[in-house]
Image: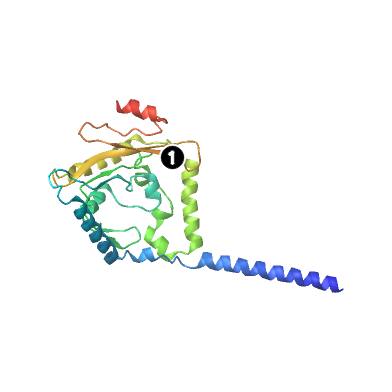
Amino acid sequence: MRRQAQAGGTKIRVLLVAVLLISLVAYQLLIPIEDPSLDGPDNSVAVSASANQLVEVQAATSGTEGQHQVYWGDLHIHTSLSSDAFTMGVRAVPDDVYRFAKGETLEHGAGYPVTITRPLDFAAVTDHAEYLGQAKLSGLDVPTTRQSLSDILRRENRLTVTQSWWEIMSLIRENGFKLTLTGVDADINRAAWDEIVAAAERHNEPGVFTTFPGWEWSADTGDVGTHLHRNVIYGSDDLPSIPFSSIDGPTPPDLWAFLR
């Protein structure tokens, strides 16, 4: 009887611990997202850090005026024309990229304003050539098209947010962004590429701000989560009618042959 009582008591304790753990997990999943970044950045800290860095650069380059000139820019930027970025909630277009790079204030996906601490000298929009523009221009139905990223993060709880991301990643994994029955839509790819080129032409200001048309060629290496990312940047008006993707040629030599 004594052993049976002890065994029964042990089972009850194990059951209580299990119930407690399940309750804690459920509580964590159902509480709202608590992310300080949703309230926007602390601009005072960013500006202060930027000012200190600028002083250091000026000190390091003093006495070399006329000998060297450093230009700052970004040659790897995605917009809503990249299918992965669009499904994750990015809504910025190529024009937004250049406006931001030149110092204009834009709205972050989480709903607050963002401004670069110091305008850039050059920039390039390099969206993925694979299914370029297709997620945005084909009327894709995913959580981030049903409501904004800001609403998802602010109004949903951790469980529903996780479910949303799982739905998106399942779409990517199972369909590879083949969002129509015909797979890649060349007309959509071409329209997206024309938008990228036109934005670069509009925002290029010789001697003030330089833009470069370009795209990203990305291919799987065979390992899960491992990709080869190569940005193709053009410095002239000699442009292809449509970008070359890893769907057109899956190996780097295929890309080199296209660029010759």
Q: Quadrant of residue 10?
A: bottom right
Which residue: 43% across, 67% down? 34
Question: Mark 1 — residue?
Answer: 227
Where is 133 relative to 257, above or below? Answer: below
Picture coordinates of residue 142, whole percent (x, y): 43, 51
**Residue 251 vs residue 45, the one in the foreground:** 45
In this orientation, does residue 104 appear? no
Picture coordinates of residue 170, whole percent (x, y): 50, 47
233 with respect to 153 (left or right): left
**Residue 136 vs residue 27, the one in the foreground:** 27
Q: Residues within 10 Å of mark 1 (few under 14, many from 20)?
A: few
Which residue: 15% across, 45% down? 205
Q: Residue furthest right?
A: 1
Which residue: 22% across, 53% down? 57
Picture coordinates of residue 66, whole percent (x, y): 12, 44
Q: Quadrant of residue 180?
A: top left
- Location of the N terminus by quadrant is bottom right
